[in-house]
Image (spheres, helix red, strand yellow):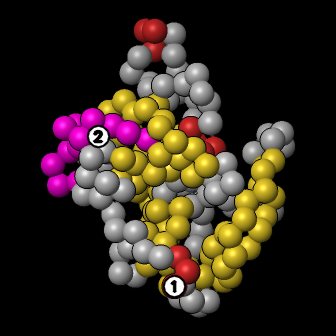
Amino acid sequence: LKMVVPGDIKSQGKQVVGQGSGFLVRSNGLIATNKHVVADKSADYQVVFSNGTKVLAKVVATDPVNDVALLKIDEGKIPSGVTALLLANSKDLLIGQTVIAIGNALGELSNTVTKGIISATNRSITAGDSAGGQTEKLVKIIQTDAAINTGNSGGPLLSTNGEVVGINTALNQG
């Protein structure tokens, strides 16, 4: 899923200001993404499914410690064939285990897939925005060498069994 501020309501004076990724976690329309993807409380958010279907979404919960947010869409608007992803226990991850990161790289390339390994678990980092303004301490982070680009934030980090083991959240721009 691509998360965007609705671009098709420009007539109301709104414009696309950012993009990220997300994924369906419940068949009732519950979607997971990063808190920083939906941090603007005054914005309207839109989910764009891979088939192009656009649905307005409401932020229903945020967790700044883990950089996680949950959004809700009307379950009747989920396109046919789209199903919730299975969640795995990230405590079962092993160093060296293969993982797959999915997202919308650079906010332009839909449904990109990269592969890497788990380099470490339970890392703590201080993450900042690209403008160098706000920073947050993130704990219990999974470190991987799978390529994560701007726009991949909020996308699922999957095991080779296709289960979600984490959410793409931060990248080293250096």
Residue at (29% x, 40% y) in the render: 52
Label 1 and label 2: CA atoms lie apart by: 35 Å
- Amino acid at circle 1: Asp
Residue at (57% x, 44% y) in the render: 62
The answer, for residue 106, to whether it is visible in the render is: no
The residue under label 1 is 92
- Amino acid at circle 2: Gly
Residue at (63% x, 44% y) in the render: 36
Does 51 sit left or right of 174 as displayed?
left
Which numbered mark, 1 or 2, is in the foreground of this view? 1
Q: Is residue 87 above or below residue 61?
A: below
Q: Is residue 5 magenta?
A: no
The residue under label 2 is 52
Residue 77, how many percent across, how many down? 22, 37
Please name whichever residue, 13 or 122, is drawn nearer the observer in this view of the structure.
122
Label 1 vs 2, first from the N-terminus:
2
Contact between marks 1 and 2 (CB within 8 A): the answer is no
Residues drawn in magenta: 71-82
The answer, for residue 16, to whether it is visible in the render is: yes
Q: Is residue 81 magenta?
A: yes
Q: Residues within 10 Å of mark 1 (few under 14, many from 20)?
A: few
Q: Residues within 10 Å of mark 2 (few under 14, many from 20)?
A: few
Does 84 sit left or right of 104 as displayed?
left
Classify residue 10 by image quadrant. top left
Q: Quadrant of the C terminus?
A: bottom right
Determine the secondary structure under disc 2: loop
